[in-house]
Amino acid sequence: MESLGDEPWDVVICGTGLQQSLLALALSRSKKRILHTDPNDYYGQHEAALTLQDAERFAAKYAASSGAGDERKSVLRNAAVWKPDDAEAQGLKFPRAYSLALAPQIIHTKSKLLSNLVSSRAYRQVEFLAVGSFYVYEPAKDGSDSKLSRIPSSREDVFSSQSIPARSKRSLMKFLKFVLEFESDDQKPLWEDQADAPLTDFLTAQFKLEDDLKRYVVALTMALDGKASVRSGLAAINRHLTSMGTFGPGFCAVYPKWGGLSEVAQVACRAGAVGGGIYMLDTSATLKPSGENEKASLELSNDITVQAGSVISGQETTTGGQAISRLVAVVKSPLNSLFQVLVEGAPTPAVAVVALPSTPSPIYALVHSSDTGECPVGQCVVYLTTLATADSKHELEQALAMLVKAVEGEESTSPCLYQLYYEQAIGDRKSTTEKLGTTSALSFPPLSVTLAFEDSDLEAVKSAWSLVMGDESDEETYLVFEDREGADAEDEIYE
Amino acid sequence: MASEDTIPVLKVLIIGPSGAGKSALLLRYCDDQFDPESSTATIGIDFKSKHLAVRGKAYRLNVFDTAGQERFRTLSTSYYRGAHGVILVYDISSRASFVGMEKWIDEAKQNAAPNAILYLVGSKLDKVAGGGRAVSYEEGQAFAEANGAMFCEVSAKTKENIKRPFVEVVDQIVQKPDLLAGALPRSNNTTLNIGNLGSDYSSACPC
């Protein structure tokens, strides 16, 4: 243990959230001496995947409410777990049978995160699953029960759809064709002067889309406030459509098996370790005051003091502002009808996306089948998200019940076996940097809490990499690596 | 011989305390190398691949090293994903390394698939000649049996028994169809081939 304090660390990375972990991956082929710590005894921080035991500790740690005043507040707050008294009798399995993702973002197939993972050869250790259909919740009306309507998301899909009248199909096709090239010089004049206006108004004025179709389009933007602007909404739908089919038919996004971005963070940390980085979990690090001509000192919770050329961490607090509410629920039903293969040759999807109308902002549910490895067979995990209000916990619970009934029918009795609720601040999205003696320190903003992974979150990782590499940073080499393992050893045949 | 794409790939992990000789075992078995001077933590080895045939069938064995993450017990849960077998290594000349195996067995059982093969290896068998044995063969074997693991003692230095743990682990794996099922290429219709994005895009299978 002594040697840790003597080592002249080039960089100390505090926290194993996605961004810190990707930095460790990016530095894994450099000769930098790296110490990577995390205050928790698991990897991933705000992007971790939790067993039920972890979830209980997580809820206890972040149970506090945000409180009043304008002091900085914890990014995570108001956490609580709940289960029925007889949960085990009803089917809840042992705590490690579950892996609840704190970051269940879907990753579009065109995302830079995937190309980074491929070029750095880290992707081999991650199992990716397909994200399948997107649905809109339809409340009961005219004597028919509530149901989920699948959103057609390709032109073929629109053609074959039975639920859209022919005239509407033509408008929708015209819109889809436009979105595919909305940034071209031909199409820009159509929307540029109203780029910040609401997308729904634009859909009515330009494409005469009817209300049902508008709801489909708005749901596909996955805007948490349900009020996408023309610019952001068109960009989101363009991403959705152009990502479709990249890796195979029938899906536009993927999801890492076993707990989402947590897996990516762990695999990136492993790459950091293979490159010689030293890993310490369950160890917090506190900056000590340092003199003008000194390197930064960090005191670790095991009483060792280390010196670092750079210190990279993640912001744990924010200055108030908007937060989202998240409800993670284990449901005792596989909800199989959401995970059907609808296009020939498509992989079996493990994730379905459902938009439920609600005021003041919509509720989105990401439904994960047991193929994600996040729950036992015969159950599913539902991740519900909405903008936080005083009443959002209750609304998410209601939305969960509505969703299950819409899939299984009004008589459904599939119980919720476990719930984790928490609120997560959206934060101001900017890295902070400061000078500590001769040391540069950078702190990542919290990851975007959007439903789909945002490539803009990768920019801060690259900035941190440039900061650590200094004069040696050559952009061409950023996250571009050869495979590690040597050629196969000569074959040996045993009987 | 079957082409590379159709050979089942088996994932075997080596775990155990620092200095137990995990990397020496791996390097001797896969590359037939042994460096008596090397006592530092392992850098740069992710895993090593080796082809072997058991019961007349070819397999590719990927043996994963801990990459130093055993030092402060920071192996991630993702390291254990999809492992068909786990080889747990202690140093027969170190009482402390044997005593620590209890925790490593627990970790392996908690994180690896319930039907994964466990194999206990006592390393540095060459030290017996100099009177360096601190853990008897019987103790090792009894501990392995109590935990449903197989057992042998090896020396990476003299090569004694060096192939045995790997061959026996594979032999056990291939006799468990449910365990082997996940090793077959395209054995399920859910996991995707993201590598299509890479430089070999044009030659890759489009599925």
Image (spheres, coloured by chain):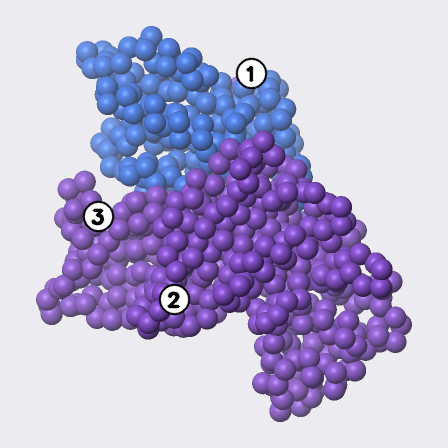
Chain colours: A purple, B blue
First in residue order: circle 1 vs circle 3: 3
Q: Position of residue A130 (x, y in %)?
A: 64, 52
- Give the labeled residue for mark 1: A495
Image quadrant in which you'd find residue A223: bottom right
Asked if disc 2 and disc 3 are in contact, CB closer than 8 Å, the reply is no
Q: Look at label 2 and name its amino acid.
A: Pro
A480 sits left or right of B132 in the view: right
- Give the labeled residue for mark 3: A301
First in residue order: circle 2 vs circle 3: 3
| Marks 2 and 3 belong to one chain | yes
- Give the labeled residue for mark 2: A445
Q: Residue at x 49, y 36 (%)?
A: A95
Mark number, residue B57: none
The residue marked by circle 1 belongs to what chain?
A
The residue marked by circle 2 belongs to what chain?
A
Q: Position of residue A261 (x, y in %)?
A: 49, 53
Q: Residue at x 21, y 50 (%)?
A: A300
Image quadrant in which you'd find residue A406: bottom right
| Marks 2 and 1 belong to one chain | yes
Mark 1 vs mark 3, foreground winner is 3
Q: Look at label 3 and name its amino acid.
A: Ser
Q: Position of residue A104 (x, y in %)?
A: 54, 54
First in residue order: circle 2 vs circle 1: 2
Q: Residue at x 55, y 40 (%)?
A: A84
Task: Tell me, yes or no, if residue B7 can be seen here.
Answer: no
Q: Secondary structure at mark 3?
A: loop
The residue marked by circle 3 belongs to what chain?
A
Q: Position of residue B180 (x, y in %)?
A: 60, 28
Q: Look at label 1 and name its amino acid.
A: Glu
Is A48 or B82 nearer to us in this picture? A48
Q: Residues within 10 Å of mark 3 (few under 14, many from 20)?
A: few
